[in-house]
């Protein structure tokens, strides 16, 4: 395989494409800290995070990190089990639950759970934040706010420079000054768990909320299930067991809660990886009347990624690509070992495909997307290899994380007021976007300085 067939590419190319950093790595648009010392707080509702990752350990607020996987009303996973929560600066005067009966009950329960004398853990139930569950959340957090660092070399590390004792890990996210609060749920969360996640983000007064995945609301994830057949909703006819009325009510109130919260603080949502025309739920709740931001994906050439829609979305963020071969377009990786041009029509879209991927932080060691060659646990101090510390990532999950980081950077740099509400933040984001055409479609791509620098081909350097 030659370098011409598989050229190297910059792991930070998405930041350069958005104008956040220049090609020579010089910081652009941000300073080591905000003038008033206030860090932008990004609440991420996803899986748990490898908080000990060297590039993330200073980005994650361990005191506020909240786990809703293990127990109904949540646990503070990085505090001693018997430690009292202590006083938290909570926004208990919030009115987001007004008029929503189930929501009002849950908000009262959560506020009581967060009282100073409550224990960090509930009973002896251990929080579910181990490495096995943390791959997606770790990659998302790295894109948003990872910090470049250097760590000691553990015994056996094959240092390329004799005598060097530190290993540089020069990876960073869009806003290396922000504060990340992971709010973890399980992989098939109940509506109650998701309601509590959003209410917690509201109570801790997050500056913005990132949801890089879908929600399993049966009536909104598959809208066809709301069709009436023989006087009954199809959802109830095909469910393996009857859907309890309380659960239906919770789903309905959650669909009302998210737009309400977005008016106070922007809610950034991944739009999906299946070419969904209007995006997945809840990204498809985005409208000009709320602060929900629906994010699709473009590749390193500046074209819509093969898996992403570009219509009915708020913005498009940088990400990887995928092949497609259907009536709409033929987009194949000509570098693939099994590529063949047989059957590819003239005038195909292969020129749009980009093999560039997103690089982000990964769970160190034997778990995660990239795994270590060692079978033993990682050393407590230092690194013995760095391959498992980073991974290839992509999808609209990655794109939404870049957009959330861009918004956080706006607030951290004070280009966007820290007190901007959801509608103001959304308007600012759109004012910092370039309109780029792709065939009959036009989309908005975030650009800090009004230019886009897509690295995989000069055609898109606009």
Image (cartoon, rainbow, N blue to C red):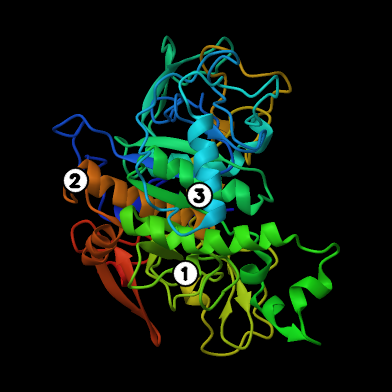
Evaluate whether residue 270 shows in this view. no
Residue 196 position, x and y percent, is 54, 44
* Residue shown at 78% from the left, 71% from the top: 236
From the viewer's perspective, is residue 164 above or below residue 122?
A: above
* Residue receiving disc 1: 285
- Total labels: the figure holds 3
Name the quadrant containing residue 399. Answer: bottom left
**Residue placed most toward the observer, 200 or 15:** 200
Q: CA distance from mark 2 to mark 3?
A: 41 Å
* Residue shown at 50% from the left, 58% from the top: 100
* Residue receiving disc 2: 29
Please identify, in this view, whether the residue under mark 2 or under mark 3 is nearer the observer: 3
The mark that comes first in sequence, 2 or 3, is 2
Q: CA distance from mark 1 to mark 3?
A: 22 Å
Q: CA distance from mark 1 to mark 2?
A: 31 Å
Q: Please indicate whether residue 186 sits to the left or right of residue 205 in the image.
A: right
Graded by Cα atoms within 10 Å as few (under 14), some (14 to 19) or many (20 or more), the crowding at tag 3 reads: some
Q: Identify the element where label 2 is drawn.
A: loop
Name the quadrant containing residue 426. Answer: bottom left
The mark that comes first in sequence, 1 or 2, is 2
Asked whether the beta carbons under mark 2 and mark 3 sit within 8 Å of each other, the answer is no
**Residue placed most toward the observer, 258 or 245:** 245
Please identify, in this view, whether the residue under mark 1 or under mark 3 is nearer the observer: 3
Q: Identify the element where label 3 is drawn.
A: helix
**Residue placed most toward the observer, 347 or 114:** 114
Residue 340 position, x and y percent, is 67, 75
Graded by Cα atoms within 10 Å as few (under 14), some (14 to 19) or many (20 or more), the crowding at tag 2 reads: some
Residue 304 position, x and y percent, is 45, 72
From the viewer's perspective, is residue 281 above or below residue 212?
A: below
Evaluate whether residue 111 shows in this view. yes
* Residue shown at 68% from the left, 19% from the top: 377
* Residue receiving disc 3: 104
């Amino acid at each position: 395989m030659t370098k011409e067939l598989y050229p190297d590419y910059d792991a930070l190319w998405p930041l350069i494409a958005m104008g956040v950093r220049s090609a020579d790595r010089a910081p652009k648009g941000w300073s080591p800290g905000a003038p008033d010392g206030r860090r932008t707080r990004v609440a991420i509702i996803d899986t748990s995070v490898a908080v000990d990752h060297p590039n993330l350990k200073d980005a994650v607020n361990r005191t506020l990190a909240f786990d809703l996987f293990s127990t109904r009303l949540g646990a503070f996973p990085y505090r001693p089990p018997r430690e009292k929560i202590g006083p938290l600066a909570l926004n208990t005067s919030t009115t987001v639950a007004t008029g929503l009966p189930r929501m009002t009950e849950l908000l009262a329960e959560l506020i009581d759970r967060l009282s100073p004398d409550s224990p960090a853990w509930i009973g002896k139930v251990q929080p579910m934040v181990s490495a096995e569950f943390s791959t997606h959340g770790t990659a998302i957090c790295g894109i948003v706010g990872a910090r470049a660092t250097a760590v000691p070399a553990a015994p056996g590390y094959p240092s390329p420079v004799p005598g060097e004792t530190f290993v540089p890990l020069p990876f960073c996210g869009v806003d290396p000054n922000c504060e990340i609060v992971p709010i973890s749920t399980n992989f098939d969360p109940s509506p109650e768990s998701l309601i509590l996640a959003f209410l917690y983000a509201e109570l801790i007064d997050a500056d913005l909320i990132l949801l890089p995945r879908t929600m399993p609301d049966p009536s909104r994830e598959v809208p066809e299930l709301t069709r009436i057949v023989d006087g009954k909703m199809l959802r109830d006819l095909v469910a393996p067991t009857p859907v309890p009325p309380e659960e239906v009510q919770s789903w309905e109130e959650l669909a009302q809660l998210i737009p309400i919260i977005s008016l106070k603080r922007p809610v950034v949502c991944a739009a999906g990886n299946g070419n969904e025309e209007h995006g997945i739920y809840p990204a498809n709740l985005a409208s000009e009347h709320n602060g929900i931001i629906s994010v699709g994906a473009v590749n390193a050439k500046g074209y819509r990624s093969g898996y992403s829609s570009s219509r009915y979305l708020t913005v498009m963020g940088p990400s990887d690509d995928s092949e497609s071969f259907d009536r709409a377009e033929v987009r194949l990786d000509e570098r693939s070992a099994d590529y063949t041009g047989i059957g590819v029509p003239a005038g195909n879209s292969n020129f749009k495909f980009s093999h560039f991927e997103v690089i982000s932080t990964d769970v160190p060691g034997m778990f995660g997307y990239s795994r270590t060659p060692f079978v033993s646990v990682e050393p407590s101090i230092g690194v013995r290899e760095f391959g498992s510390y980073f991974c290839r990532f992509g999808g609209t999950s990655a794109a939404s994380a870049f957009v959330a980081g861009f918004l956080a950077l706006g607030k951290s740099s004070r280009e966007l007021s820290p007190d901007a509400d959801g509608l103001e933040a959304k308007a600012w984001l759109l004012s910092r976007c370039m309109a780029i055409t792709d065939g009959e479609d036009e989309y908005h791509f975030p650009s800090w300085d009004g230019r886009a620098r897509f690295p995989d081909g000069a055609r898109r350097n606009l």
